[in-house]
Image (tube, rainbow, N blue to C red):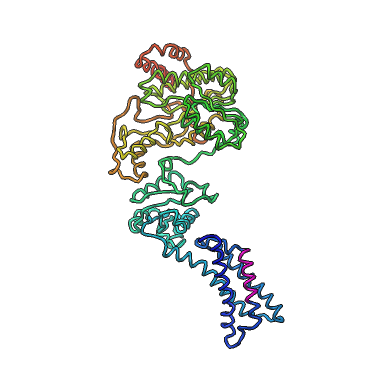
Amino acid sequence: MGYKQRILLLVLLDSVIVSTAIFIASWVVYPNTTLIGTADIVITVIALLLFHHLFAFKYKLYHKVWSYASIGELIAIAKAVTFTIVATGVIQFIVSNFTLYRRALIVTWLLHITLIGGSRFVWRIYRDRYMKDKGKKKRTLIVGAGAAGAMIARQLRNEHQNTDLLPVAFVDDNLAMHKMQMYDLPVAGSSKDIPKLAKELEIDQIVIAIPSLTNGALSEMVATCNSTNAKVQMVPKIEDIVSGRVSVSTLKNVDVEDVLGRDPVELDINSISEYVTGNTVMVTGAGGSIGSEICRQLMRFTPSKILLVGHGEFSIYSIDMELKQKYQQSEIEIIPIIADVQDRERIFEVVDKHHPRIIYHAAAHKHVPLMEYNPHEAVKNNIIGTKNVSEAADAFNVHTFVLVSTDKAVNPTNVMGATKRVAEMVVQDLASRSETKFVAVRFGNVLGSRGSVIPLFKKQIEQGGPITVTHPDMTRYFMTIPEASRLVIQAGTLARGGEIFVLDMGEPVKIVDLAKNLIKLSGYTEEEISIEFSGIRPGEKMYEELLGENEVHPEAVYDKIYIGKTMEVEQNRLWELLSSFKDHSNEQLKEHLMEIVYREQQKKLEVAK
């Protein structure tokens, strides 16, 4: 039905109700009189019609979507009807020689409320009770009967054309809510009852509507929900509750990041703003997982200029377009720069031209098995590249240089870890004789980064499996990309020169448990997607270390940021490696790298004794 036809229908319907209601009221109140047909009743009918349509348009009774009518619409009807009766009473009193038929008007008010309101709400009742197709909908259990749960329940009951979910019940750990009802849905029990209720109520879908859950509690809740055969979704985050953005369309699948992520770190906004806002910042490896996220986080602090430096054309193009589109109204100058950190002349040219205040050096080769096969490339990119960028920072008086390092630099057993440890040594050496503040930040695996297991596992699941895990006891530390990037930026504000900051990665996670979680969260069972063990790859450790023995001060310098104890770097051995590495075979180069880091470990042990 068109807009004009809809309004005309409502106007005609209301006119019939208003015209007849006064006659019915007169007959009810004055059954033994001949009031009908008098001039008073005719004037009253005319006044009721005029005033009703006037107030109906004022309160937009003809413009509301009555299929979603609620308390607000009922209040609008009450206001329009009340003012109509009052205005009509005034007219009646004046025209009828100060006579007012109060009881007739009161009954008329009641009839208007009942008939006009009923005519609007009957369509919603009919649609809700008879037009919805329950048979094709997924029976849904809502976890959490708070604000988010109430919003989700309300929208699921109303927005049938947009969702195939049918709310059946709530569960909530607040005992006072049990056996209560919201939107005609019972609060059937607490979270521990989910497996039982899922079976009894034949639940197809579970929605976790408690956005304030900490990651540990969320992990337990997801585990409980996963013990059923229902698919699990969740409300994104608590900010959406505050802003009122929670809706059925914002429900998302539970990701491994939600289960493994930790409570967010509160940044020291003032200290970051002090040295980022209004200044030029440079990020190498800006197209990579960590580098691009560092760029996104830095943009929040409105630097005057941000240099996106990277070797890969498409990745730099992508982050450049993303930032320019998001901050097109900003005055921040975003400059994409194609440059290889191994090209010393080009790097010096970039730093000399733009004079950044801070450099975040995230460019590196990070894939462990690949670097085992290509150790010379690891040395060129991870060590010489770091040397080029750090020496450019020193030459042009950059205020702070932050090296993004790795947990694999602790007691390294592979080429990648050894080259990153040597890169840390390069930075530490420069810190001892430069006015630039050189620091390194060391952390473990980041969820969802390129080369991490998460994208690989997801791809294997999409292909129907199996998921390949190297060893059943393989463990790793994990951190989300945004959290790692924020802590890297925060560590830069703590720099005094020469430190190796170590990020608290929380508890290590078994890779096989990660794979099992991902299978379940993707809606499969381990019978449908199997797990196969492929054996440890070249250079891999069974267990990663973040805090080397006698290497880290016990007290955190900031929430989840620790500072490492530094050793004097043997410059001669570094320069010997860099001058001769091209002449080494792969095996000789690996031995040379391990010799350097092994000697350092020996010195630490001697100092500890």
Say whether residue 160 is visible.
yes
Residue 234 x %, y %: 44, 48
Residue lying at 41% horizontally and 55% vertically, measured from the top left: 165
Q: Is residue 606 above or below residue 148?
A: above
**Is residue 17 rendered to the left or right of residue 580?**
right
Q: In this rendered view, identify the residue nearer to me: 246 or 432.
A: 246
Say whether residue 561 is visible.
no
Q: Is residue 329 above or below residue 380?
A: below
Identify the magenta region. 45-58
Q: Quadrant of residue 446?
A: top left
Give the tally of numbered discs.
0
Q: Main secondary structure of the magenta part?
A: helix
The question of residue 327 being in magenta is answered with no
Residue 298 x %, y %: 55, 33
Q: Quadrant of residue 41?
A: bottom right
**Is residue 466 rendered to the left or right of residue 577?**
left
Residue 321 x %, y %: 52, 33
Residue lying at 48% horizontally and 65% vertically, measured from the top left: 123
Image quarter (top left, top right, bottom left or bottom right) of the C terminus? top left
Residue 467 x %, y %: 31, 37
Q: Is residue 361 above or below residue 65?
A: above
Q: In this rendered view, identify the residue nearer to me: 498 or 384.
A: 384
